[in-house]
Image: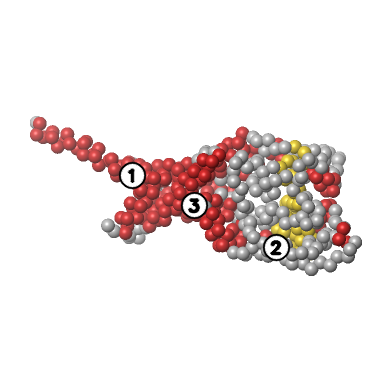
């Protein structure tokens, strides 16, 4: 049996075995491409408000005091540049509330029909709607099917590759023809397979990051080492050891240093005695590990944020205050920049800008955005959506071609039998 024949049968068997699961992941993937946009639209009334005319918002110090006055200790407070957007108080990776900057009122988020639907799509996409202990089974099935999809794409590219590069052959391989039946399925399978191969390969390879621990380790290695936190030798007097800058001074320093800021996140929990604003905070700056779409489904295992790595142990002695700042001028990576401030005066010591990170580390930190095709903005989302739709058609045409291969011949023989006996009967 030739090598091409071996790859063909591998392609066919892999498609038959995992085709249904691939179709489910492709359908849910096409929907989840627009997850953040749909959820943000559906929750706009919860996250935004109309600022009262003629009134001034509460000071940063008062807002921090309101966030810290809750029974549950707050971990971080996120300020947004949009004046009509509520602040966000995070109590944990899955628990957060919104804070009105004018009244200081805290409100818990409510799930909308759109956010509930998107959560259902995510549960199907990752675990085939299995819950509890069965989620590991669903994860194993989707992970194995994803690897089989990688095999399908790679072998499909080889099988697609023309033996002779002529204009006539390429026209049939690169665009749709007006044909029916088996010829139509074959044509659609080839054309869509060619145009969707690259984005689908990117989606399937990046999905390994969530399916297997070795996949996460590989992408962490591929991203290279995390930059070590800068070491500062800060000499403070005994009196200064008990002094801390106000939250207002910290936010003012951050907004001045990064004038194009869109989000400023203060860490409220005590970080080595540094007080509000101290501590490293979440590496991805999201505060909760999920988009605005609401809390993580119950029972979902914790996932490290994209780009989360191991930094060296914090040095002893006085250390600077670290503030996460998202710059509206930096779209890649989506991670925030880190601002290091003096622990007493809030003077800027260093800005670790996200745009200055090595390319491989930017890619690692953007792996979720790459997988969901949001890294390239609306154009990337459209491409991702069309690629997922193409995958659905590939599954359908693949099954149709397989059916004709295994059962089409017998039907032809049965249909031809009466025609052969007809002359004898006459």
Between discs 2 and 3, the one toward the N terminus = 3
Q: Residue 386's spot in the image, x, y percent?
A: 50, 46
213 versus 86 height, above or below: below
Residue 313's disc number: 2
For the C terminus, the image quarter is top left
Q: Residue 385's spot in the image, x, y percent?
A: 52, 46
Q: Tell me if I can see residue 344 in this picture.
A: yes
Q: Nearer the viewer, residue 277 or 421?
A: 277
- Which label lies toward us, 2 or 3? 2
Q: Is mark 2 on a helix, strand or loop?
A: loop
Q: Going 48% across and 47% down the picture, which residue do you hit?
A: 140
Q: Going 36% across and 48% down the picture, which residue do you hit?
A: 13
Q: Nearer the viewer, residue 304 or 264?
A: 304
Between discs 2 and 1, the one toward the N terminus = 2
Which picture quadrant has residue 406?
top left
Q: Mark 3 points at which residue?
A: 204
For the N terminus, the image quarter is bottom left
């Amino acid at each position: 049996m030739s090598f091409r024949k071996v790859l063909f049968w591998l392609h066919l068997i892999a498609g038959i075995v995992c085709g249904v699961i691939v179709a489910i992941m492709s359908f849910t993937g096409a929907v989840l491409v627009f997850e953040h946009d749909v959820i943000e639209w559906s929750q706009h009334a919860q996250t935004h408000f109309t600022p009262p005319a003629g009134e001034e918002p509460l000071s940063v110090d008062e807002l921090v005091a309101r966030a810290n006055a809750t029974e549950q200790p707050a971990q971080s407070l996120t300020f947004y540049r949009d004046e009509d957007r509520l602040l966000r108080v995070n109590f944990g990776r899955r628990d957060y509330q919104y804070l009105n900057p004018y009244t200081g009122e805290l409100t818990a988020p409510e799930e909308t029909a759109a956010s509930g639907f998107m959560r259902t799509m995510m549960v199907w996409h990752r675990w085939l709607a299995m819950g509890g202990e069965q989620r590991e089974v669903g994860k194993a099935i989707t992970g194995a099917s994803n690897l089989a999809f990688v095999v399908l794409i790679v072998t499909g590219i080889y099988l697609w590759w023309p033996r002779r590069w002529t204009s006539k052959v390429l026209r049939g391989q690169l665009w749709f023809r007006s044909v029916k039946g088996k010829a139509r399925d074959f044509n659609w399978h080839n054309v869509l397979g060619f145009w969707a191969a690259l984005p689908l390969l990117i989606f399937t390879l990046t999905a390994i990051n969530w399916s297997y621990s070795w996949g996460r380790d590989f992408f962490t290695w591929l991203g290279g080492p995390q930059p070590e936190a800068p070491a500062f030798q800060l000499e403070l007097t005994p009196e200064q050891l008990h002094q801390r800058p106000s939250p207002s001074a910290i936010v003012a320093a951050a907004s001045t240093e990064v004038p194009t800021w869109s989000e400023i996140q203060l860490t409220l929990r005590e970080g080595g005695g540094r007080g509000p604003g101290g501590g490293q905070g979440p590496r991805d700056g999201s505060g909760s590990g999920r988009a605005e779409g609401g809390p993580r489904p119950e029972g979902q295992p914790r996932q490290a944020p994209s780009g989360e790595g191991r930094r060296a142990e914090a040095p002893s002695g006085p250390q600077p205050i670290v503030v996460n700042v998202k710059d509206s001028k930096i779209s890649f990576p989506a991670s925030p920049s880190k601002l290091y401030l003096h622990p007493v005066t809030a003077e800027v010591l260093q800005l670790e800008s996200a745009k200055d990170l090595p390319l491989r580390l930017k890619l690692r930190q953007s792996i979720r955005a790459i997988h969901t095709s949001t890294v390239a903005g609306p154009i990337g989302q459209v491409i991702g959506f069309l690629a997922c739709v193409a995958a659905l058609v590939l599954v359908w045409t693949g099954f149709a071609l397989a059916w004709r291969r295994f059962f089409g011949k017998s039907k032809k023989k049965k249909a031809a039998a009466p025609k052969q006996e007809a002359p004898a009967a006459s």
